[in-house]
Image: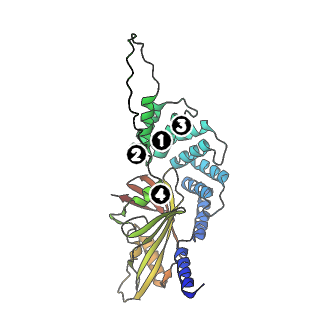
Amino acid sequence: MNTRSLILLLAFVISFSAFADNSDYVWNDQFTAKLAKAKDGDRRAQYDLGNMYIKGQGTTKDTKTAFDWIGKSAKQGYVKAKYKLGFMNLNGIGTAKNLRTANKWLSQAASENYAPAQFALAGMYVDGLHVKQDYAEAITWLKKAKASGFWKANSELKRISALAKRAPRKIAKAAPQAPRKAVAKKPARKKVERGEPALSAIVLAGNWLQRGKPSKFLPSKVNDCQLREAGIFCTSNELKGQSGSSRFSYRIEVVMRDFTEAGEFSATYRNNILSVEQIQVAAAVPDETDEDEEVSAEEQAEREQARASRQISTGLQATIHTLECQLENVKAINCIKDHGRSIKLTSR
């Protein structure tokens, strides 16, 4: 291999490694924190812990243990856990299939207006699983899921409505008529049914905004994103930031994966510092990399103290941030960042 080819190969490996999965230790920390809260009876932590066992985040994949933790959360009334427990019983994930139990939990979550549960419950009525096949009941639940903006409800509602129209009905006997001469007709063209695009495609296509400004973390006008088999990979445009006496330019590199039927997905990101300039400041300056976040006065004070002792260097930063996101509808995503901070995103 000549020198030029070797340089090109190294450049490719280095650029690709920026998107390598280096987030294991972050999930390990979060798993430890969630486990402690879950053992203390925190129902949200129990649900999150179950999901981490399903996805293998911070621990090995274990659907049986996931089922147990999500069950604890559901029994405490957490609606997302009720849905997930019903879904796991319906599909035999972490337990044997149990349609009766699946219907129980999905019905509870659907009655609490949780759209993914309404969608799943409709499917049980369509297929006659544990319940009598009933297109009208399925349509009722699909309409509720659509009203909540669930991303798959619209296309499924059209499909089931069409099935309901073609379902056999009892027709009163009419008086016999003379047979008509058959007339040859051209075969009708079949309509192509187009379902909703995949969740990852919806996320990729959205111009996501955070407080009216393009998101740095999800696909928007300020980053370049690509859909690959392993997920969505994004690199932001060059951004400007300031922390204490350091003014710097940087890019944010994001990986989104673990897309689920319920509209959930995970993301990890970290900053790549391109250049740093030391300046004179008269007072504490807010960190511009976090300018879109709502933080408490106590947390702001802690950040300022950390900035004072932190030296910023160029290159890909060691700190990895996590986002757990839920697509509410094709125009809205809610994310939980790191240890519980909420971020809302919208798309025009």
Above or below, 142 relative to 169? below
Disc number placed over residue 130 in the picture, else none? none
Whether the residues at callouts 3 and 2 have beta carbons within 8 Å, the answer is no
Q: Residue 239 at x, y = what percent?
A: 38, 76
Amino acid under disc 4: Ser
Marks 3 and 4 in Cβ contact (< 8 Å): no
Q: Which residue lies under the disc numbered 2? A: 148
Residue holding disc 3: 124
Question: Which of 90/335 is in front?
Answer: 90
The answer to whether residue 116 is left or right of residue 58 is left
Q: Dot 2: what SS?
A: loop
- Which quadrant would the N terminus be assigned to in this image? bottom right
**Image quarter for residue 82?**
top right
Q: Is residue 298 above or below residue 49?
A: below
Residue 76, visible in the rendered structure: no
The residue that disc 1 covers is 118
Q: Are marks 2 and 1 in contact (CB under 8 Å)?
A: yes
